[in-house]
Image (cartoon, grey):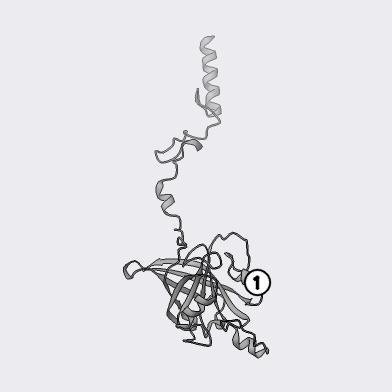
Amino acid sequence: MIRGLVGALVAGASLTGCSVGEDRSSAGPAKTASPSEPTSRTSRPSPTPSAARDEPPRLASDGRSRFSSLAIPAIGVTDLRVVPYQGSPDDAPGTRIQNGGVAASPSGPDGGVGPGGVGNFIVTAHRTSSTRAFAQLPGLRRGHRVHVEVGPPRARVRYTYEIVRTRSTSFRSPASLERQSAAVPGHPGRPPTRAMITLSTCATPEDHAQGNYWSDEFDNPEHRIDKIGVLVARRTL
């Protein structure tokens, strides 16, 4: 009788296609993890230190005032010397610097930051007098590039800004002057988060065409044309 029962069990196993002790839910041999394959969520390797090194480097400088040189290929400006000073745009010291045929860059509470600094790097130059360094500035358009170089020959750094908009400043409006020298151009009181540039020159021909011959004690006309740019690249030369 016992032999008959065992024979029945073996026959049943053969009909189902399964061997004794096999799990029918398994379609094949169990998969084993390879040495390079994580076996669980918690066993995945953590990021390596090289991942941090792959992040884009910070473009901006420390913002200190420095002598620099300016190039604007779109309007033919090359190697224009930019002289820093403590003050506000186109004040007496700034006007004297521009009268010497170079550009001026005010810094401090009423000015801006240095080349590449987070905030507003302000550069002013004459359009209709002296060397007429910014004679073609009104022709600068959105997308044009501005290059500012600082440092000694063997450790020179080039900051590249891209023009994004144009604004007008009135010398007869304290609020307008405040917007010109704001850390975020046009937005006094707004904390800066990126490096920007303001290139400014007189709107004398435009004012005179409108019959506006007003000027201040330094011969600055009422309006100035400001080209605003943002820092897009930094390169060690």
Q: Residue furthest left?
A: 154
**Residue 107 appears left or right of 67:** right
User: Which residue position holds label 1?
Assistant: 174
What residue type is disc 1 on? Pro
Task: Please determine whether, in this image, residue 236 is positioned above or below residue 225.
Answer: above
Residue 40 visible in this rendered orientation of the protein: no
Residue at x 31% of width, y 68% of height:
154
Q: Is 218 situated above or below 7?
A: below
Total numbered badges shown on the rendered structure: 1
Which residue sits at x=45%, y=39%? 38
Place of residue 224 in the rendered image (x, y in percent of width and height, measured from the top left)? 60, 79
Residue 143 at x, y = what percent?
54, 74
**Callout 1 environment at 10 Å: few (<14), some (14 to 19), or many (20+)?**
few
Compare residues 164 and 175 and report the one nearer the observer: 175
Q: Please tell me which residue lies in front, 164 or 174.
A: 174
| Position of the N terminus by quadrant | top right
Res 205 → quadrant: bottom right
